[in-house]
Image: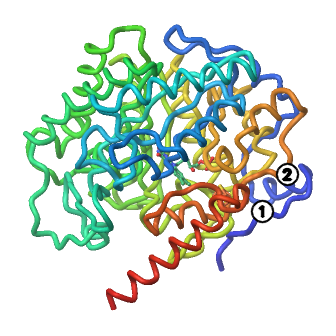
């Protein structure tokens, strides 16, 4: 029988009892003052230790510039009081967009990002007396590219018998050539330079969730310069970091959000034991951390798993899964402990380079107690909020100034925001931002069902 359970804790004692029953090491702290400790990231001051994790809304304009919904989302994040906002997946070229509404900074629309950032900074200074750092996530969606309409247009680094059929591949298609991969380096450089010009404090070379650079990390069977050995699999990432640093100068932040563990079998995944895909093998991920730090990366955030596959709890522990996803075999607290342990190991390997933790949203208001314990114990530098940020954007202000988070405003880990993404819609919090996302949820569900019927 599955150990999975929905959140049902009335207070910290009940939560602690469950932690003890499951023999977990998760810690809770009452002292929320650690969130107010200052932090410097490559010389940039961070006002507090709470970060908003990247949360794509799939709702940019068709040219990739911020739409009204994007402006609204970031306005809520900026006013909510976090010390750092890690902006969502932004494609480095058109064919690498995950959907036609993915964010995509380019020469033609850079100024709209600049205006938005300036406006958000002014408003957050007025409201809170500080403005969060802004890091833009740069990505190529690789296997999950779908730049136009509803049809996948995958660009893969290695065939994968489990994931190929899910994006309409039969194993006979060509994989991205070494020359194609190398041609992406200037695309990352250009996007980073534009981000700098627009006023971002840094960029993230995204290597998570089995998008292109993440898949490359697990491309053990790939031949040529970028596959096979560890050195080859990390080579493109290292070249991109080096080229971006050269272009943006020393004072700009280069970050990386990377998958430390794919929960995907060898020889297709990264970070797992060759004989047991559920067993973490730290050697390569930790060596990657050390190499990134040596290469001049100033900020890290780990993630894990593949949100498009059948184990999304590895990325985001939930109460209720999106449609077609089996109930996990583990308790959400076990999934959370896995994510927290990854972060702690990375923080240890990264030394002084700050690492932002993730996987807190299922915990409701107890996120603040686990986040503060993790920061106190040096297991991460900042607590990162994903789904909680779209459900409860002013959680940071409540933690920092109003005595703590309120249960009634918290994310319910219902996966409806994920379901909208799976239905190819514009996403947000269906349960706590219902006036906007309630009707959108229904509309996209219906459209997805109609597409399914047409296929049959
Ligand atoms: C709707 C949605 C959009 C997301 N978009 C991104 C993204 O653009 N980039 C990214 O690295 N992670 C993305 N994530 C993952 C989150 O940043 C985060 O890692 C995950 O939700 C776990 O944190 P949580 O428990 O606080 O939600 C997304 C998650 C959801 C549910
Ligand atoms: S829809 Fe809202 S409540 Fe549900 S998981 Fe997403 S953010 Fe949380």
In the rendered structure, the answer to whether residue 305 lies left or right of residue 415 reads left
| Residue 347, numbered label | none
Residue at 70%, 55% (x, y): give it.
Answer: 433
On screen, 439 above or below 181? below
Residue 168 x/y as whole percent: 24, 72
Of labels 2 and 1, the one closer to you = 2
Residue at numbered disc 2: 407
Please state, as top left, top right, bottom left or bottom right, where the N terminus lies in the image.
Answer: bottom right
Residue at numbered disc 1: 7
Q: Which is more toward the observer, 310 or 231? A: 310
Q: Which is more toward the observer, 74 or 220? A: 74
Q: In terms of secondary structure, where does tag 2 sit?
A: helix
Residue sitting farthest toward the bottom: 456
Residue at 36%, 52% (x, y): give it.
Answer: 210
Residue at 60%, 12% (x, y): give it.
Answer: 45
Query: Mark 2 or 1 closer to N-term?
Result: 1
User: Does ligand 2 reach within 8 Å of label 1's beta carbon?
Assistant: no
In the rendered structure, the answer to whether residue 39 lies left or right of residue 109 reads right
């Amino acid at each position: 029988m599955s150990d999975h359970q929905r959140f049902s804790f009335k207070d910290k004692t009940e939560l602690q009892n469950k932690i003890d029953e499951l023999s977990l090491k998760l810690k809770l702290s009452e002292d929320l003052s650690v969130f107010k400790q200052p932090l410097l990231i490559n010389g940039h001051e961070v006002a507090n230790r709470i970060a908003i994790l990247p949360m794509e809304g799939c709702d940019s304009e068709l040219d990739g510039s911020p739409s009204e919904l994007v402006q609204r989302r970031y306005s809520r994040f900026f006013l909510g009081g976090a010390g750092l906002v890690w902006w969502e997946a932004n494609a480095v070229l058109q064919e690498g967009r995950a959907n036609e509404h993915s964010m995509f900074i380019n020469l033609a629309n850079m100024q709209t990002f600049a205006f938005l950032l300036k406006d958000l900074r002014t408003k957050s200074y007025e409201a809170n007396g500080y403005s969060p750092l802004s890091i833009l996530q740069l990505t190529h969606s690789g296997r999950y590219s779908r730049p136009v309409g509803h049809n996948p247009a995958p660009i893969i680094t290695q065939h994968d018998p489990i994931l190929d059929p899910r994006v309409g591949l039969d194993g006979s298609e060509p994989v991205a050539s070494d020359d194609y991969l190398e041609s992406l380096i200037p695309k990352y450089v250009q996007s980073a330079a534009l981000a700098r010009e627009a006023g971002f404090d840094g960029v993230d070379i995204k290597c998570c969730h089995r998008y292109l650079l993440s898949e490359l990390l697990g491309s053990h069977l790939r031949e040529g310069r970028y596959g096979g050995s560890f050195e080859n699999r990390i080579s493109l990432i290292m070249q991109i970091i080096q080229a971006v640093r050269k272009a943006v100068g020393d004072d700009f932040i280069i970050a990386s959000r990377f998958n430390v563990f794919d929960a995907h079998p060898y020889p297709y995944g990264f970070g797992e034991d060759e004989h047991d895909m559920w067993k973490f093998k730290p050697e390569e991920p930790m060596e990657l951390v050390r190499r990134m730090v040596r290469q001049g990366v100033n900020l890290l955030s780990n993630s894990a798993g593949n949100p498009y596959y059948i184990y999304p709890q590895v990325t985001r522990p939930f109460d209720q899964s999106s449609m077609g996803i089996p109930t996990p075999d583990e308790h959400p607290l076990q999934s959370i402990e896995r994510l927290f342990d990854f972060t702690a190991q990375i923080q240890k390997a990264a030394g002084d380079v700050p690492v932002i933790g993730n996987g807190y949203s299922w915990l409701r208001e107890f996120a603040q107690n686990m986040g503060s314990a993790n920061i106190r114990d040096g297991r991460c530098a900042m607590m990162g909020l994903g789904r909680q940020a779209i459900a409860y954007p002013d959680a940071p202000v409540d933690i920092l100034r109003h005595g703590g988070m309120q249960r009634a405003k918290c994310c319910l880990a219902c996966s409806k925001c994920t379901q909208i993404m799976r239905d190819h819609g514009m996403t947000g919090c269906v349960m706590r931002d219902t006036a906007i996302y309630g009707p959108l949820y229904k509309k996209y569900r219906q459209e997805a069902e109609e597409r399914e019927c047409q296929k049959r």
